[in-house]
Amino acid sequence: MEKKKYSIEEVVSFLEFKLESNTATYDQEQLYVDYKWNGKLKRNYTLKKTFKEMKEWS
């Protein structure tokens, strides 16, 4: 089974979509804000959960 790899742009776009549709969790919102401030996505549980959500959507 091959793992799906997502680019940073894809993850950020997904987070923006969730924020615009008011379906993002507080942690996803903080992940997005941290990215906008620091220019990097922190590898943590929230990012891993977001990857899982993206996989379910595709």
Image (cartoon, grey):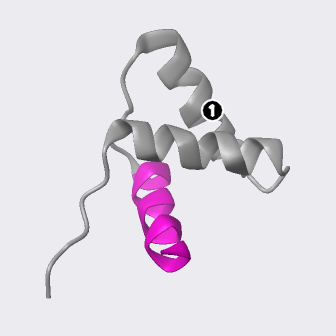
Q: Amino acid at mark 1?
A: Gln
The residue that appears at 39% across and 58% down in the rendered structure is 48
Q: How many marks?
A: 1
Q: Residue 22 vs residue 49: left or right? A: right
Q: Is residue 2 above or below residue 24?
A: below
Residue shown at the point (75%, 42%) measured from the top left: 19
In this view, the residue farthest toward the top is 37
On whether residue 47 falls in the magenta region, the answer is yes
Residue assigned mark 1: 30
Q: What's the magenta region?
A: 45-58
- 50, above or below 2, in the image: above
Q: Secondary structure at mark 1?
A: helix
Majority secondary structure of magenta residues:
helix
Name the side, left or right, on which 49 lies relative to 21: left
The quadrant holding residue 3 is: bottom left
Extreme residue toward the right, this view: 22
Furthest-bottom residue in view? 1
Is residue 51 a member of the stretch shown in magenta?
Answer: yes
Q: Name the residue: 60% across, 44% down.
A: 15
Local packing at callout 1 (Cα closer than 10 Å; few below 14, some 14-19, many 20+) is few
Task: Locate the N terminus by quadrant.
Answer: bottom left
Q: Position of residue 18 (x, y in %)?
A: 71, 51
Residue at 55% of width from left, 35% of height from top? 31
Closest to the observer: 35 or 44?
35
Q: Position of residue 42 (x, y in %)?
A: 37, 34
